[in-house]
Image (cartoon, helix red, strand yellow):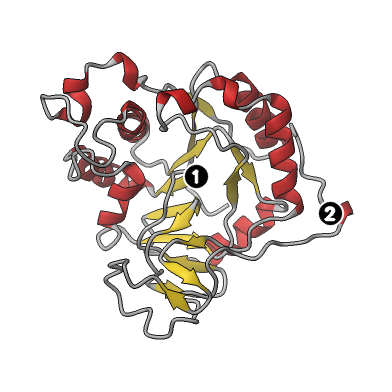
Amino acid sequence: EGLTQPLVYVVSMPERTPRRQRFASSFAGLQLRESFEWAPVVDGTLMPEELWWMKGFADNSSGDSGNPGQWASYVTHLAIMREGYERCPSCDLVVFEDNVVFRPNFLNHWSRFIRAVPDDWAVLRLGGQSLWEPPSEVFGDYIRTSSVASTWGYIVRAKHVQSLADLLATLPEKGTGGIDAVMHKFTRQLASYAPQVPLVHVASGCHDTAAIESSRSECESPDSLKTEALQLLKAWPLGYTRSYCVTRGHSDKTFDIGQTSCADDVSDLCCPYRDPPLEQPLANKVTQVHGT
């Protein structure tokens, strides 16, 4: 609902079999008309360090410059946008990571969100690890975002896919931040919104963009994915961690948030909490566990 001929890609490394099985079953449980396809992931470790961030030299000086996973993720998402636009310039682009869990009653929550969000939207962020900066606007079912950590799930409107890809292709950060950090640079040009409550979350602490030794397939199993997914479904986060907040009503003054929305620290525009409260549904409501 609300999208135009969506192309759905799932970022996934071939060896992540448990994730793929769980995602495929969960997605099927949503009973959508659309299908999805696995997006081929670039393996950054197979690329010479001199090519990371197109610097021409190996750079381990700052940020994600020396992280092959972050570079690979950046290239992968950029390639998805390029391919999606080439295949269908009139199609909205939907991208998920393979370890996401869909919020219970996902379709109902999605319908409320897409009906409420302003029609000027260019990018929709469906979930994220945290907000690095206060939202610029807060409404009942959505927020206008300035900086969302992670790329767990997002949608790029068809008419903006090429523009976003072109902006990302300039490599404005050159490795000082991953793709999520770079995308926030364009939120003034490309109106970005997110649901008040995330529609997707992740069921694994393993990150393919992390250091090689901590992103091996051994760091998760089918059982651990199932356990973490069930924990999320039983206690869904009712918001996003506010990384610029210390506690409720107290912003971290060391953060250069560059906005006036923290004039009232306790407001929804600033620090209504540091970590979001958790939804506690009745046990018999937790039924959307396909694949978990």
The numbered disc on residue 153 is 1
Location of residue 78 in the rendering, given as x and y in whole percent from the top left corner? 31, 34
Residue at the image point whose x is 26% and y is 63% from the top: 188
Task: Decide if residue 67 is in sight here.
Answer: yes
Write down the quadrant of residue 81 in the picture: top left
Please indicate whether residue 57 sits to the left or right of residue 16 in the image: left
Q: Residue 53, image x and y in percent?
A: 20, 31
Which residue is found at the position 16% from the left and 40% from the top? 170
The residue positioned farthest toward the left in the image shown? 56
Locate residue 139 relative to residue 225 in the image: left or right. Answer: left
In the depicted structure, whether residue 18 falls above or below residue 182: above
Relative image position of residue 56 (x, y in whole percent):
10, 24
What residue is drawn where x is 34% and y is 33%?
70
| Amino acid identity at mark 1 | Gly
Decide: few, some or many residues near mark 2? Use Cα within 10 Å; few <14, some 14-19, many ≥20.
few
Say what amino acid the circle numbered 2 marks.
Lys
Residue name at image x 48 percent, y 74 percent: 271
Q: Which residue is mark 2?
A: 285
Among all residues in the image, which is located at the extreme bottom? 264
